[in-house]
Image: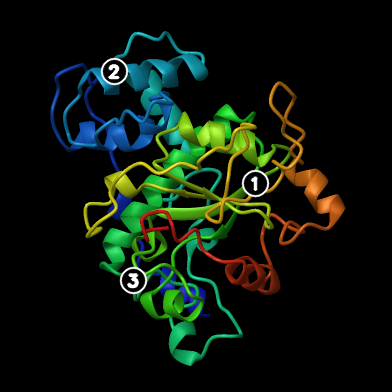
Amino acid sequence: MCLLVGLAGLQPAAFARKFDRSLHRRDRGADVKALEVRVAGWFSHRNQSQLPVNNYFGYRTLVAVRHFQNHYGLKPNGVAGNGVFKIFRRLKSRDGSTRHFDWKEFAQRANSSCGAQANAYAGTFRGGAISFTRVKSNVRRMMWRLEAVRAKGGANPVGINSGFRSVTYNDCIGGASASQHMYGTAADNRIAGIGNRRARGLAKNSQVQGIGCYSSASHNHFDLRVENRWLPSSRFWWWPDRDSAGRDLDETGRPCFGETSRRRGGGNKALSTIEAVRAGTLGVGSFVPSAAEVAAFERAGEPDDLGTAD
């Protein structure tokens, strides 16, 4: 019941976008911003170059549109027209979410270790660091970014372990003081059949600006910190450091999950999520995590060194 109440405030019209003109380089307007929200994940550069979501159809938007068109079998001319908009319609849901992600996957979880106040917003997007509508707008932007990650990863399912958190809930589980989760700009996740290192590589090529990993839990933290204009600090790119053997490291300097077998000049033997399920690794028993799994993931700790803005 709580979930139904929490999500009832979302009306399809609130997130509907009717594209009624073809969009070209140097065009401006709200429809250009809506285009950028949908294609930003296709500006594939690993050098931390941002595609601004700013109502202006610039060169980077053009590149993103071309990559999007190429992936979906369209002529990569950089013009967002009927073919592009048809794919958008195929990738969106009537309630404003996207085809492969649902609002309830990102709504606040419940945690039996927390009190009534922290769990008051379970199943909703309320009680965060910004307004309910802004949180949902951010969550929706993350959905589109994850659609790009998912498509580039062979359309393997992406499971969301933790999305939005209210301020009181974040405090209860020991989240970072400026956690991106309180803004709806973060998603802890795992991808079926793909090692965590490859998943992080896909994210780096999909405009995911904050990436965190863990040594003992098989999920990654993705966030859109650079685009979070409400964040008081830490609006900079943050990806895992690597050691001399080329292994991604967690906040404590330990190799991230699946990285322990990586050696200089050797192959990456990182476990895929499916292999991790078979091995009984923490939290990977289901792509729709149970309450016990959620609690286990959250007790595993936050990557606090991500500028205190995990």
Q: Residues within 10 Å of mark 1 (few under 14, many from 20)?
A: many
Q: Residue at x 22, y 60 (%)?
A: 232
Is residue 16 at all visible to an observer of this figure? no
Q: Is residue 230 left or right of residue 126?
A: left
In the figure, residue 227 lies in which quadrant? top left
In the figure, residue 136 lies in which quadrant? bottom left
Amino acid type, label 3: Gly
State whether residue 303 is above or below residue 143: below
Residue highlighted by disc 2: 62
- Which circle marks residue 255 in the picture? 1
State whether residue 275 is above or below residue 57: below
Query: Looking at the image, is mark 1 or mark 3 earlier in the sequence?
Result: 3
In the figure, residue 27 lies in which quadrant? top left
Q: Residue at x 58, y 80 (%)?
A: 111
**Viewer-side residue, 117 vs 20:** 117
Query: Looking at the image, is mark 2 or mark 1 earlier in the sequence?
Result: 2
Q: Residue at x 56, y 66 (%)?
A: 301
Q: Position of residue 254 (x, y in %)?
A: 62, 51
Q: Position of residue 246 (x, y in %)?
A: 61, 31
Tell which tag, 2 or 1, sits nearer the viewer.
Answer: 1
- Measure the C-alpha gap from mark 1 to mark 3: 32 Å
**Quadrant of the frame with the C terminus:** bottom left
Query: Looking at the image, is mark 2 or mark 3 earlier in the sequence?
Result: 2
**Viewer-side residue, 163 vs 24:** 163
Mark 2 touching mark 1, by CB under 8 A?
Answer: no
Please tell me whether mark 2 sits on a helix, a strand or a loop: helix
